[in-house]
Structure formats: structure tokens, C-alpha cells
Amino acid sequence: MTKFTSDRLLLFGATGDLSRRMLLPSLCALDAEGLLDPCIEIVGTARSEMSDLEFRNFARESLEQFLPANRRGGMATFLNRLTYQHLDANDLDGFTALAEKVGTPRHGLSIFLSTAPSLFEPTIRGLQQSGLAGENVRIGLEKPLGVDLASSKVINDAVAAAFPEDRIFRIDHYLGKETVQNLLALRFANLMFEPLWNAAHIDHVQITVAETVGLESRVGYYDDSGALRDMVQNHMLQLLALVAMEPPVSYEATTVRDEKVKVLRSLRAVSTDETVTGQYRAGAIGGQAVPGYDEELGKDSKTETFVAIKAHIDNWRWQGVPFYMRTGKRLPKRTTEVVVQFRNVPHSIFSGRGAKTVPNRLVISLQPDENITLSLMAKTPGLDREGFGLRSIPLAISMPDAFAGPQRRIAYERLWLDLIEGDQTLFVRRDEVEAQWEWIDAIRAVWDEQEQEPKTYTAGSWGPSAAIALAERDGKTWHE
């Protein structure tokens, strides 16, 4: 791999919602902390007609809205780095003007594609023809990378025609979250967990990604996608892979991603009774009435806004351990968490004294708060002639409290920095993407074969009752 640090950034989709909320604020925050090269230049491009000044004003408004005031230090300096070039991705001649705007980087160029997937292919062709795909150019691709395995391969083939794999950075922003990276630290920087991290000691694992919002501004995309493609195919399978992977030889891109791929390829095909889909109807969130999905969409739809899956990993470490995953919109609480439920002690010496043991549980919360909690059994204080009281108590680590420092970072800060520096560890390799899609496509094929339609659930609930039964018929209970 050719090592270089980019001194030019080119952002496609620079006036889009993701750019406003995440990408421009992330770059400004990095600049405020001195993590960007003082000479770095940033070129934004999109269909909108704008001058450099108008783009800077657009960026200023975005920063004032989405970046805390105490993280905007040196904002004026950052804004002066920004220039803009109008571009229609289907107009190849426009790329010539874009190349002139970008100029010749001293060290390297990093390109970030935050556009509709339908624009990936013409954009790649334009980059090639205009000389913006050379040896010192990296490209970052924002999801979605297709809607199934076949369309994903088309996109990946188009990108591979211009860029080798070691210069392609496929983005899953969950991997930029501090607590997701802490999964690796928790497992591989602490000796105590590894001897227990297997089927002999773990009863099951739960992964929940719950949202309180509905469609918001994603009407067209979401109805074509649904919860399975939008959340399970990328974020949730990446979390599963990090929980289940074998220890890599080192914390490097190749070794970490090799182990994740092994997990994804070990996923067992899911049967009909191991999935539940749902679609929210009118209800209440936080005491406020909200409409049903069809009402928000403005038409009848069979798209799932909730999915629960019981997954199995067929390898030596995890044989027989179910991984329960659920995600949905209009659920009662916004949360992302991983729950590792350990088995109970094989024999309780306290049972004769009326005390009941409860299995230990490790809860790793990603949002809205970044916490790690391990429940342990302890004796209840006091004297008791008739028994020996036991209670499960939490050992809790609040990451913001444990590490005094800046406010919680935007996940894209880490990813921007790694793209600029050329570190692919927290990005997704092509074989990972295709292994994920292969498993997802098989689930959708089962749904289509069985003509499975989503069950309704009331907004503000935890999904269809069948999702609760998915765990309870195995004697498990969802962590809420």
C-alpha cells in the first residue's frame, strides 16, 4: 500500500443533509483540534449553483446548527479552506472544471462520495477521465452500496475499475463510534474476558438498534430499503462481527477485517420462524401522537420498519449460542446496545439458604450514552437468620465520566482522519460487504417465498408481540 497523507479533500454531495449534519462539522472539529494539516484544502461539489462565498456561508450555518460552540474554535480559518465547484455527475465535461478547481495536490487527494448510489458509476468515470483517480488518490464511499448482492457487485466493480482495494474506503459510520472501537479494547486488551468469550460460558447475545423517529427526510430511500437493508445489512452485522470475531494477530486493517469476514461467512441461513418483521401504526412517542408508516408515506406499503432475527454462527466458538438482533423505527427509546448474557453458575452453594443466583450480564451501550455495565452477584448487607441474601449489582463505566476531555465526538471525525491518513482498519472491505449481502439476500428470499408481510405494531411499543416471542420461546428475555 502506498502511504501518503492527503492535503486535498474533495467532497461530493457537499450541500446534502449528511454534509450539513456530520461531514462539515466533523472536519471543522478536527481542524479546531489541530488534527488537519494547516495547508489542507477542501473542495465541495454538488448540483447546486454556488460561489465559494455562498458555500462558506452554507457551511457556517451548518456548523452553527450542528456543532457545539465550544468545538468551533478557529471556524473562520476552517471556512477559508473551503471552495466550491458546481457539478452534474452525468456531465463528463464538468469534471474537467472540477479537476482544475481541485488542482494538483502536493501529497495526496481524498475523495468522499456522499451521493445517491446511482451516481457512483458516472462519478467514477468522470474521475478517471479528468485525471482525479491517480495513484495518490483515495476514495471513500458512503452507504448504501447497492440493494442486494448483484447491485453491490456492480458498484464495487465500477469503483475497482479506477481504484485498487487498498485505496477504497467503504464507510459504515458505526465503526467510527468510540464505544464500537471499545468493543475491541474490551475484548483484546483485558485478559479476564477471553477465557469466557465462548459457547461454554455465554448463553446468548442481543444487539438492539432502536429509533424513535419515523421517516423524516428519507421517504423515497427508506421505502425501497426497509429495516433489513437499512440497518441489519451494515451496522448490525458489523457489531455482530466485532462481538464474535477471533483475536486478530494485530490491530491492522488486514488482520482485523480477515477475522470479521470469517464470522460473516459462518452465519447460518435463517429459517422462516427465526425472523419477525413489523410496520408501525399510529401511536405516541414521548407523549406526542405520531402517525403510522402508511400515513407518513402517503400510500400503502409492505416495507418493514422493524425486524428481529435469531442468528447463529456455525463455528467452534459460538456453536449453539443464539444472537438475537432487532431494529426498528418508532420504538419507545433511542438506543443502540450489545448485551452479552453469560450462563448461570453450574451449582449454587447458596440455594439451601434461599438465595437465588442471576447470570452475569455485560451491557455495552453505544447511544444515546456510551456506557459499559457488568452485573455481578453480591451479598445484600445485613443479618438474616433464615437466609443468605444475594442481589445483582452493576459495575458501571460511563465513558464521558471516565475520560475527562472534549465532548462526545461525531463518528465521522475518526473516519475522516483515517481516510486522510490511509488507515483502512475501521472501513469495510469488499468481501465483507458481499458476505453481508449474501446473508441478507437469503433472508429476503425466504420472506418472498413465504409471502411474508410485516405485522403491525403501535408506535411507542417494542415492536410486534411475535418479536418478544422470538426470544421468550427459547427462555430468553429482551433487555429493555
Image: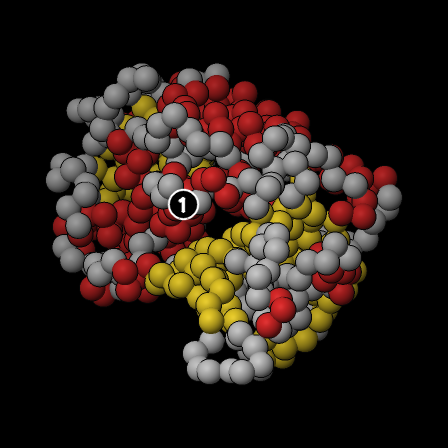
Left or right: 78 as drawn, with respect to 249: left
Foreground residue, 100 or 162? 162
Total numbered labels: 1
Foreground residue, 298 or 189? 189
Left or right: 114 as drawn, with respect to 436: left
> Looking at the image, is 392 positioned above or below residue 278?
below
Residue 119 horizontal/vertical position (percent): 51, 34
> Looking at the image, is 88 positioned above or below residue 356?
above
Direction front: furthest residue = 385
Foreground residue, 316 or 275? 316
Quarter occupied by residue 423: top left
Mark 1 element type: loop
Whether residue 93 is visible here, answered yes or no, is no
Residue 42 horizontal/vertical position (percent): 25, 39
- Label 1: how many residues lie within 10 Å, few (<14), some (14-19) or many (20+)? few
Left or right: 34 as drawn, with respect to 410: left
Foreground residue, 478 or 385? 385
* Residue plotted at (43% across, 78% down): 381
The quadrant in which the C terminus is found is bottom right
* Residue plotted at (48% across, 25% down): 258
The quadrant in which the N terminus is found is top left
* Residue plotted at (23% across, 48% down): 30
In this picture the colour scheme is secondary structure
Residue 174 horizontal/vertical position (percent): 45, 47
Residue 283 horizontal/vertical position (percent): 68, 75
Whether residue 178 is visible here, answered yes or no, is yes
Q: Write down the residue under mark 1.
A: 192
What is the three-letter code of the residue carrying label 1? Met
* Residue plotted at (18% across, 55% down): 75
Quarter occupied by residue 146: top right
